[in-house]
Image: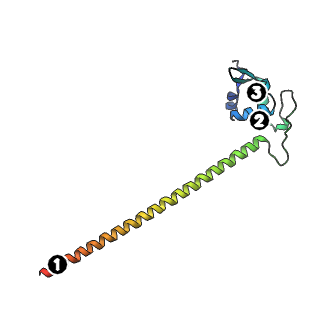
Amino acid sequence: MSENYKTIKELADELGVSKTYIEKIIRVVNIHSELLKKKNRFFLNIKQQEIIKNYLDKPPTQAPTADKEPPTQAPTADKEPPTQAHQHKHQQQIKNHQHKHQQQIKNHQHKHQQQIKNRQHKHQQQIKNHQHKHQQQIKNHQHKHQQQM
């Protein structure tokens, strides 16, 4: 294919976003029917690439749309533009994931500390039992030795 065309994946990689996000922008700016399709792959010409790049740089209401009407769904005052909303959602997912893992680590550490305490207690009991047994053997030996004298 010509240098003037890029696949959706190539453009996504270049812009540092996902292929799915580029596909969403293509639908929002309404250029999906204009894409060149060859062997089940879609290609974007330079103009279409610029439309997508401009969309990423501007809020959706200001994004150019290949000589068509702007998207009907404009962000409201209480709603962030899709790129910011997407970033916020992703950041929240990361925070939730990190919190979940931190909690799992704490639980795991607590479990291991409990196991260590249980083992220490068991070993201390074994030592006491062993000492008591030896003390008893010593007493028996001393008592036997005294009787022999």
Query: Which of label 1 and label 3 is nearer to you?
Result: 1
Residue 56 image label: 2
Residue 85: x and y in percent read 76, 44
In this view, the residue farthest toward the right is 69
Is residue 53 among the parts visible in the rendering? no
**Nearer-N-terminus badge (2/1):** 2
- Please report contact status of discs 1 and 3: CB closer than 8 Å, yes or no: no
Q: Residue 136 placed where, x, y %?
A: 25, 75
- Considering every residue shown, the one lying at the far top of the view is 2
Give the mark, 1 or 3, whose residue is nearer the N terminus.
3
Q: CA distance from mark 2 to mark 3?
A: 11 Å
Q: Nearer the viewer, mark 2 or mark 1?
A: 1
Instruction: Name which residue type carries label 1.
Output: Lys
Disc 1/disc 3 C-alpha distance (Å)? 101 Å
Residue 145 spot, x, y in % from top left: 15, 78
- Residue at 41% of width from left, 63% of height from top? 119
Residue designated by label 1 = 144
Residue 33 seen by the camera: yes
Q: CA distance from mark 2 to mark 1?
A: 96 Å
Identify the residue under disc 3. 49
